[in-house]
Image (cartoon, rainbow, N blue to C red):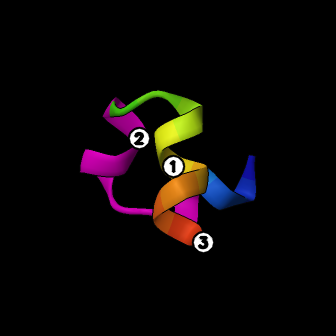
Amino acid sequence: MPEMVLTPHKSTRRPRSSMRKDRV
């Protein structure tokens, strides 16, 4: 789960699908 570590803590709170949208 390195992606979660790279993303801010706020992003971790959101669902995984949301995280993917943020990355795109």
Q: Is residue 14 above or below residue 20?
A: above
Residue 7 magenta-highlighted:
yes
Callout 3: few (<14), some (14-19), or many (20+) C-alpha neighbours within 10 Å?
Answer: few
Judging by the rendered image, the residue that carries numbered circle 2 is 12
Three-letter residue code for mark 1: Met
Q: Decide which of tag 2 and tag 1 comes sooner along the chain.
A: 2
Three-letter residue code for mark 3: Val
| Residue under the image location 53 percent in, 56 percent down | 21
Q: Nearer the viewer, mark 3 or mark 1?
A: 3
Q: Decide which of tag 3 and tag 1 comes sooner along the chain.
A: 1
User: Label 2, label 3: how many angstroms apart (C-alpha)?
Assistant: 16 Å
Q: Which SS type dominates the magenta stretch?
A: helix
Callout 2: few (<14), some (14-19), or many (20+) C-alpha neighbours within 10 Å?
Answer: some
Q: Are marks 3 and 1 in contact (CB under 8 Å)?
A: no
Q: Are marks 2 and 1 in contact (CB under 8 Å)?
A: yes
Residue 8, given in percent of the width and then of the height, sits at 34, 61
> What residue span does the magenta drawing correspond to?
5-13
User: Label 3, label 1: how many angstroms apart (C-alpha)?
Assistant: 9 Å
| Residue under the image location 60 percent in, 72 percent down | 24
Judging by the rendered image, the residue that carries numbered circle 3 is 24
| Residue under the image location 46 percent in, 63 percent down | 22
